[in-house]
Image: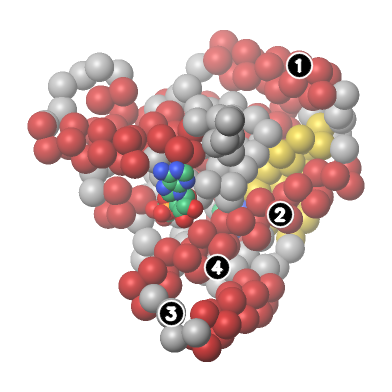
C-alpha cells in the first residue's frame, strides 16, 4: 500500500504543478473516502491543504467523525454550515414550483439531496479560488462505474485520485494511512437524508461491485443491477456537456 500511496502523492503534486496552483482542498464528511483523500492531500501539501466540513442537517456523530479525520491527519480545516443556505434555497425553489401546481412529492427527496451536493461543490470552488487550490474529489472505482454521485455535485471536481481503487482497496489504504478504525469500518452513506446507506439505495453491495470490477463472478441479478446503474449514468462520465454540432 505504501507504493500506491507514494504514487498518488507524487501525482497530486504533479497535478498542482501543471496547473500552476499551490495546493488542494477536499470536503470532509466523516466518511471513509474523504478521510483517505484528506490524508493524501495533507501528505502531498503539508502547508497547502485544507479540509472543509459542510454540514447540512448533519448528525453530531458524523461531525465528530469529521473532526477525528482532521485530527488524525493534522490537516488545516474550515467549517461552512450550509444548513440554512440549503433550507432557504430549496424552500424558495419548491415554493415557485408549487405555485405552478407542478411540485413532485416523488422527486422531492432526491432533488433536495442533490442540491446539498451541489452547494458543497460551489463552496469548495469558492474556497479553492481564494487559496489558489484545486478541488479534489473522493469517488472510488465502484461509485464511478455505477454513477453513484451527483452530476456537478460531488462529481464536480478537478481530480479523482481514488477512481481506480475499489472500495475495499480504499478501506485498506485508510487503515495504512492511520484513519481511525471506526471510520475505516463505517457503513458507507451519502448522508443526503436520514438513514440513507449507499448499499440500500444501489440495491447491491460494494463487495459485489468490487468483485465484478475485478472480473470475478457475481450473480446474474447483481450483474444486471450494476450494468443498469452503469448504463443510466453514462452521461455523467462522458465529456460534458454534450455539444450540438451542425
Ligand atoms: N441521458 C442523459 N443525458 C444527459 N443528462 C442526463 C441524462 N439523464 C439524466 N441527465 C441529467 O442528470 C440529472 C440526474 O443526475 P444527478 O443529478 O446526478 O441525479 P441522480 O443520478 O438521479 O442522483 C444522484 C445519485 O447519487 C447518489 N449520491 C449523490 C451524492 C453523493 C453520493 C455519495 O455517495 O456520497 C451519492 C444519490 O444518493 C443518488 O442516488 C438529471 O436531472 C438530468 O439533468
Ligand atoms: N457534511 C459534509 N461535509 C463536507 N463534505 C461532505 C459532506 N458530506 C459529503 N461531503 C463530500 O461529498 C463526498 C461524497 O460523499 P461520500 O459519502 O461518497 O464519501 P465519504 O462520506 O467520504 O465516504 P463513504 O462513501 O464511505 O460515506 C465526500 O467524500 C465529501 O468530500
Ligand atoms: Mg459518506
Q: Which mark is residue 103?
A: 3
Report if residue 67 is visible in the image.
no
CA separation in Å, label 1 and label 4: 34 Å
Determine the residue positioned at 65% across, 56% down: 120
The disc, 3 or 2, on the residue closer to the chain's N-terminal end is 3
Q: Is residue 152 left or right of residue 42?
A: left
The disc, 1 or 4, on the residue closer to the chain's N-terminal end is 1
Q: Which mark is residue 14?
A: 1
Q: Which residue is mark 4?
A: 58
Closer to viewer: mark 1 or mark 4:
1
Vertical order, 144 against 110 (above or below)? above
Within 10 Å of disc 3 (Cα), the crowding (few <14, some 14-19, many 20+) is: some
Closer to viewer: mark 3 or mark 2:
3
Say if mark 1 contacts mark 3, CB within 8 Å. no
The disc, 1 or 2, on the residue closer to the chain's N-terminal end is 1
Q: Which mark is residue 122?
A: 2
CA separation in Å, label 3 and label 4: 26 Å
Judge: label 1 CB < 8 Å from ligand 2: no
Amino acid at each position: 500500500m505504501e507504493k500506491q500511496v507514494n504514487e498518488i502523492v507524487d501525482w497530486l503534486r504533479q497535478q498542482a504543478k501543471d496547473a500552476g496552483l499551490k495546493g488542494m482542498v477536499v470536503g470532509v464528511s466523516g466518511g471513509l473516502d474523504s478521510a483517505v483523500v484528506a490524508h493524501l492531500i495533507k501528505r502531498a501539501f503539508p502547508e497547502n491543504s485544507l479540509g472543509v466540513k459542510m454540514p447540512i442537517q448533519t448528525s453530531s456523530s458524523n461531525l465528530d467523525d469529521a473532526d477525528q479525520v482532521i485530527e488524525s491527519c493534522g490537516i488545516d480545516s474550515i467549517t461552512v454550515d450550509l444548513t440554512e443556505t440549503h433550507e432557504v434555497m430549496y424552500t424558495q425553489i419548491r415554493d415557485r414550483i408549487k405555485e405552478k401546481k407542478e411540485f413532485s412529492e416523488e422527486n422531492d427527496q432526491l432533488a433536495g439531496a442533490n442540491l446539498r451536493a451541489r452547494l458543497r461543490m460551489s463552496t469548495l470552488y469558492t474556497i479553492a479560488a481564494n487559496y489558489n487550490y484545486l478541488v479534489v474529489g473522493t469517488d472510488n472505482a465502484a461509485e464511478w462505474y455505477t454513477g453513484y454521485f451527483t452530476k456537478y455535485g460531488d462529481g464536480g471536481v478537478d481530480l479523482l485520485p481514488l477512481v481506480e481503487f475499489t472500495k475495499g482497496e480504499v478501506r485498506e489504504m485508510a487503515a495504512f494511512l492511520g484513519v481511525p478504525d471506526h471510520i475505516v469500518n463505517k457503513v458507507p452513506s451519502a448522508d443526503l437524508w436520514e438513514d440513507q446507506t449507499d448499499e440500500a439505495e444501489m440495491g447491491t453491495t460494494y463487495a459485489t461491485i468490487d468483485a465484478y470490477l475485478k472480473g470475478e463472478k457475481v450473480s446474474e441479478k447483481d450483474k444486471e443491477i450494476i450494468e443498469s446503474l452503469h448504463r443510466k449514468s453514462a452521461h455523467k462520465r462522458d465529456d460534458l456537456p454534450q455539444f450540438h454540432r451542425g
